[in-house]
């Protein structure tokens, strides 16, 4: 579909989660969480338990995934997670179809942002590594504001770009993303190909649940 034929914008600002929504990193993050917990002697979480915390700020996520690790070991736990993640950083890629999706949205005049549980340093490295600098108009990370599902990330983005809640759309792969949108008074779309099972999305009333980047792209062209 030609960008010239796009419908008028319903949303001025579209905010994306990063891991599991744009970036194909869920399986690697799960393995890195498990390895870090193992390194400090905690009970290793299951794949489902480790995937559940994706989207939270790092230390909040690790504490939730490893409840038997004492707080005095949290620094070591975080360091071990970062160690394992760096080993796999070059294995991480954008989901197929993400770049055309973002380009089409920019062509239609949407502002684009990232709202992620990653650290500012981690997001900047990821944006640089996949050559996405300049694609996004703004971003917020958990260490800059507040972790999901607190609405502060979206509230700050709305203030930065002077966008009302009804003109912002949040897209993410976890209940943390969709709950953040609810808390900020914004609409959301869930994607089922990331960290959380989509059955949990329905209570949070996303406008849609996309089962692939292609499906997300099509929905946004017709509805955003």
Image: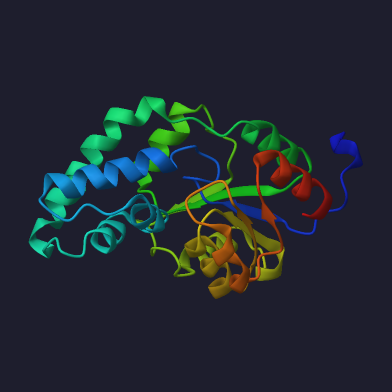
Q: How many numbered marks are there?
A: 0
Q: Name above or below for residue 76 compared with residue 207.
A: above
Q: Residue at x 47, y 63 (%)?
A: 176
- Classify residue 72 as left or right of residue 117: left
Relative placement, left or right, of 110 versus 71 is right
What sort of colour scheme is used for the picture? rainbow
In the foreground, 186 or 70: 70
In the picture as drawn, the residue positioned furthest to the right comes out as 5
Vertical order, 167 against 34 (above or below): below
**For the C terminus, which image quadrant?**
bottom right
User: Where is residue 19 drawn, in percent x and y?
Assistant: 46, 45
Q: In the figure, is residue 59 to the left or right of 95?
A: left
Q: What is the x, y in percent for residue 48?
A: 39, 54
x, y percentage for residue 216? 70, 46
Q: Please tell me which residue is depicted at 66% across the width and 63% down the height of the picture.
A: 163
Residue 158 x, y percent position in the rendering:
59, 63
Quarter-of-image position of residue 66 = bottom left
Residue most extreme to the front:
46
Q: Is residue 135 placed above or below 15 in the rendered structure?
A: above
Q: Is residue 164 left or right of residue 35?
A: right
């Amino acid at each position: 579909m030609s960008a010239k034929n796009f419908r008028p914008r319903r949303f001025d600002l579209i905010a994306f989660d990063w891991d599991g929504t744009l970036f194909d990193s869920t399986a690697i993050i799960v393995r890195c969480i498990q390895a870090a917990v193992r390194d400090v002697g905690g009970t290793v979480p299951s794949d489902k338990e480790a995937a559940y915390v994706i989207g939270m700020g790092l230390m909040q996520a690790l504490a939730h995934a490893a409840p038997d690790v004492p707080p005095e070991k949290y620094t070591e736990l975080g360091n071990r997670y970062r160690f394992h993640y760096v080993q796999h950083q070059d294995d991480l890629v954008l989901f197929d179809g993400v770049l055309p999706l973002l380009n089409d949205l920019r062509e239609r005049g949407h502002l684009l942002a990232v709202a992620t549980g990653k650290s500012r340093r981690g997001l900047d490295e990821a944006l640089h590594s996949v050559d996405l600098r300049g694609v996004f108009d703004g971003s917020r990370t958990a260490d800059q504001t507040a972790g999901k599902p607190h609405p502060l990330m979206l509230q700050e983005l709305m203030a930065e770009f002077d966008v009302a809640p009804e003109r912002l759309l949040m897209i993410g792969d976890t209940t943390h993303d969709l709950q953040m949108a609810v808390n900020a008074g914004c609409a959301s779309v869930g994607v089922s190909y990331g960290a959380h099972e989509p059955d949990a999305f329905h209570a949070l009333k996303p406008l849609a649940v996309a089962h692939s980047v292609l499906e997300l792209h099509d929905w946004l062209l017709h509805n955003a």
